[in-house]
Amino acid sequence: MTSLSATQLAEIENRHPDVFRRSLLKRYTPLLVALGCLLYVVYCWWFFSIGAVIGGGQWERANLYARQWYSYDLRPTIRFTGTEAKITYPRYSPLGNNPSPEWVNQAGGRVTVDFGSSGSVSADSKRVTVDHRGETLTMVLEPDGAKPQGPMPGWATLREDEVKVDFGFAGEARISPERVSISRRFMGWPNFVFDPNSPFWGKSFSEVAGLITSGERIKPEMSNASLAFDNIWNNSQWQHGDVWTKLLQTIVMAFVGTLFASLVALPLAFMAARNITPNFFANQLTKRFFDFLRSVDMLIWALFFTRAFGPGPLAGISAIFFTDTGTLGKVYSETLENVDDKQREGVRSVGASPVVVQRFGVVPQVLPVFLSQALYFWESNTRSATIIGAVGAGGIGLKLWEAMRTNSNWANVAYMVLLILIVVFIFDNISNALRRRLMDGGNAGH
């Protein structure tokens, strides 16, 4: 392998000065771009006070909300009446009307609540004893407050007359002279299938299956299978029927809105394409109409139509229809302006009418692209319909927003979010498969 002489190297450098003798600006452009990006990030960090926002975030509350997505808490209360301690439950407890959980023991005027491996709380009318992973804290109940006996451990906090005991994920207890408020947390979603009002509630899977297949009718007017389905569908805590109906509304909103937008945008796109309709006034009028529809966001259209039609799916369909008519019209018209004119000329050369020229010279070229774009927008609108539903346009978005606004039932929020994710995943795969087949078929046709 021969090496180049100095003269040859100089000759190559003179032949390619742009490579070997670049200007300082060209040589340092990547470094300047990287420095500019870094300065921009620093500016944004300062301008939006990102550090202060992160530092002042209520992360403890966010952690509590996150727990409520996949777990639930039960809130019994130990009340002191005379010389006895009695356990009471909220009116609408997930435990039903006559709760008797195994983690609560009431005997001899004393109540003990078991927090599993995290410890326990035992109380009578005069004294509360807390066992926390091997450590013990005793509190004497006096009229002016709960008085800890001994030093306060790190897992207990004294606030005025109340002592708060933290058991971590297992829950907490708030101890005052009148009561001990318990929050006991468990994994899962309670009463997801049957609520406490159902005759199937509390029964095992085998017991329910036996009643459905061979048991005597619980209600004479309907079979046990129909009764079980009715109890699931009308579950008062999870409202499966309403959630699934709203989910179907969201799917229909996305489909109908996209379908109507595709049908309207198709003829208008032929008017907007310069090579199809050589009329400047018609081209500009149609394109500006598309710009108007696209310039207003779907969410704004949803707010407008919610005021016009009232809350419901019609407002959502109209918002999707208006927005997508503008966007699809623009995409379709630009596709038409880039078709191969040879096919059109071939059809025109045999004396075909203008309509036939478009039908056989243009449509076969653009139809796979049009259908592919419509399918993509249908998939995208399935997600968008959830967002516009939150402003009153109907569907599961409105129900999701109502559940979040109450700030008390995040398990229902998790349920609806999970359903939305599943639907989006399914429709995404269906849309991708159909678009792939369309484009492959279009390529094969060429």
Image (spheres, rainbow, N blue to C red):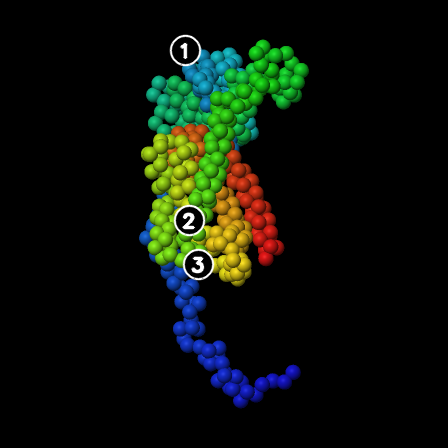
Residue 395, image x, y percentages: 44, 33
Q: What secondary structure is marked by label 2?
A: helix
Q: Nearer the viewer, residue 275 or 398?
A: 275
Q: Is residue 301 left or right of residue 4?
A: left
Neighbour tally class for label 1: few under 14, some 14-19, many 20 plus, Cα within 10 Å:
few
Neighbour tally class for label 2: few under 14, some 14-19, many 20 plus, Cα within 10 Å:
many
Q: Quadrant of the C terminus?
A: bottom right
In the rendered structure, which amino acid carries the disc numbered 1? Gly
Residue 275, labelled with which disc?
A: 3
Q: Is residue 411 left or right of residue 141?
A: right
In the rendered structure, which amino acid carries the disc numbered 3? Asn
- Whether tag 3 and tag 1 are in contact, CB under 8 A, the answer is no
Query: Who's the residue at 55% across and 44% down the image?
Result: 431
* CA distance separating discs 2 and 1: 82 Å
Q: Is residue 259 left or right of residue 288?
A: right
**Residue labelled with disc 2:** 268
- Whether tag 2 and tag 3 are in contact, CB under 8 A, the answer is no
In the image, residue 239 above or below residue 425? above
Residue 82, labelled with which disc?
A: 1
Q: What secondary structure is marked by label 1?
A: loop
Query: Who's the residue at 54% across and 50% down the image?
Result: 368
Point out the residue furthest to the bottom here: 7
Residue 443, image x, y percentages: 59, 55
Q: What secondary structure is marked by label 3?
A: loop
Earlier sequence position, callout 2 versus callout 1? 1
* CA distance separating discs 2 and 3: 14 Å
Mark 2 or 1, which is nearer the eye? 2
Residue 50, image x, y percentages: 37, 49
Q: Nearer the viewer, residue 77 or 342?
A: 342
* CA distance separating discs 3 and 1: 93 Å
Earlier sequence position, callout 2 versus callout 3? 2
Query: Who's the residue at 63% across and 18% down the image?
Result: 212
